[in-house]
Amino acid sequence: MNPAEWLKRTATRVPDAPALLTGDKMASTYDDFARAAAGIGSALTGRKISKGDRVAIFMSNRVEYLEALYGIWFAGAAAVPINAKLHPKEAAWIIGNAGAALVLSDEKLGPDLADLLSGTGPEMICVDGDDFASMRDAEPMTSPVELDGGDLSWLFYTSGTTGRPKGVMITCGMLASMTYNYFVDVDEVKAKDAILYAAPMSHGAGLYNFMHILRGARHVVPESGGFDPGEILRLGKSVGNISMFAAPTMVRRLVDAAKAAGETGDGLKTITYAGGPMYEADILEAVEVMGPRFVQIYGQGECPMGITALSRHDVADRMHPRWRDRLNSVGTAQSAVRLRVLDARGQDVPPGEIGEIAVRGATVMTRYWKAPDATRKTIRDGWLWTGDMGRMDQDGYVTLQDRSKDLIISGGSNIYPREVEEVLLAHEAVHEAAVVGRAHPEWGEDVVAFVVVHLGASVDPQELDRLCLDRIARFKRPKDYVFVDTLPKNNYGKVLKTELRTRLAEEVPK
């Protein structure tokens, strides 16, 4: 099923219903929204973009983002949303790897990217310009191009331990499974509801659009374009019935703002948290301050939003004999998937013992884009090996224990150490580098680099900062550089990052 069919049906059923809002001001009805998307689809087909082609989106959160997405799907093409926080060089690499036929960007992000793509890259269109306005106003397609469950719909780039992102091939069938699971396992959506995009629409937050399209609910982009706790609390009261995705660090900041203002989150219906570890003290206080508004999900790009869910009841329950264990879990398997916890040989471990979490089902990808080796390592006999270590109790509740791939999660954004290490090693004075996460009270973790320089060489942190800022996104840049004579290693020469993390944990916070 082409997702654009859902938009067309909703627009036919409730054409005058409010659809797209900037802040609390309506920008489009569902009829307006569908008309713009169908026009963009028509303009794309006029550019010979068709089923199977890829169209990249590199822009900040705004209502045009949804118009662009659904315009791409009207044409039968696959969307390649790119995190707006990435460096233009990183975005250019993704665009090249995806073989994008066209790039939609904005006046803020587009110019630097255009310089990199000039002469060799695909056509770029700025959504703030006349060309995009002409696309929206083009003679609309009467129906979206037909797509089946196995057709590519969303090419999602997720960072990998190789230092280069991998493209997860999200199909129409995966999106449908994810959407239906949401209604069953996470939350119901009604026409009076609204989804707020306070996190990047290129990632998890953007995936919440489908449920709300189906129900004819409202889509709200904050005027700030991002996460501002005070703004969200105000929108809760002015818009009402708001649901939103929030990383655990965002939940912490929202609760702090509510407490400071003497508020309880009126108008906020559901806050779904995911994307990193939620500390028990933080979620206990969140429920105490704001009430039973919280649901947790666990997913990956390879199984979007769809591995487990911890219900609103379980998050708020304090009566069950094991309520605390459940609160510290990520919940139970969602309806369309099966879960196992496996040892290194692929055998199930007993309940309560730690192993690697594996998942199989309709929401799980079948392969990465142009990465057969990575696919073989990740998908084994139809099971997605998540790389996350955890345990499952006798009731089916899964608790994450560790991240086997050394992933750093800062403010809900994923940072893979090797990617940063490779940039640092490009400096002629750097002999070795090891990057780890350090606990941070606001962001969850921040990035620290341990650096060994060549004998007789020297380098200052400002040089390494400049190198990182020239090659990777700002949020991936180390916040501290620790210069050491040697890195701790095991007998096989592997750096013992556990020792580095222990050293940081024992130091007095700055």
Image (spheres, grey):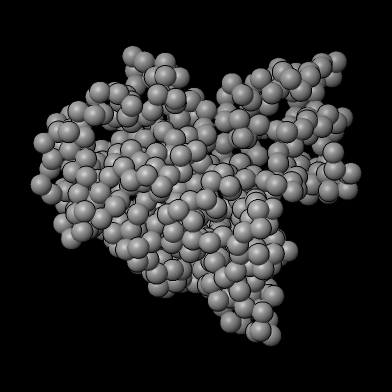
- 358 and 113: which is toward the camera: 113
Does residue 503 appear anywhere in the picture? yes
In the image, taking residue 79 as reference, residue 472 lies left or right, namely right
| Position in image of residue 229 (x %, y %) | 58, 48
Look at 78% across and 18% down and name the residue there.
459
Look at 48% across and 51% down and name the residue there.
235
Say which quarter of the image contains residue 80: top left
Look at 65% across and 39% down and name the residue there.
417
| Position in image of residue 397 (x %, y %) | 59, 75
- 58 and 441: which is toward the camera: 441
| Residue 299 to residue 205: above or below | below
Say which quarter of the image contains residue 148: bottom left
| Residue 82 to residue 2: above or below | above
In the image, taking residue 163 as reference, residue 177 lies left or right, namely left
| Residue 331 to residue 105: above or below | below
| Position in image of residue 7 (x %, y %) | 24, 53
Quadrant where the N terminus sits is bottom left
Look at 70% across and 41% down and name the residue there.
446
Quadrant where the C terminus sits is top right
In the image, taking residue 228 as reference, residue 19 lies left or right, namely left
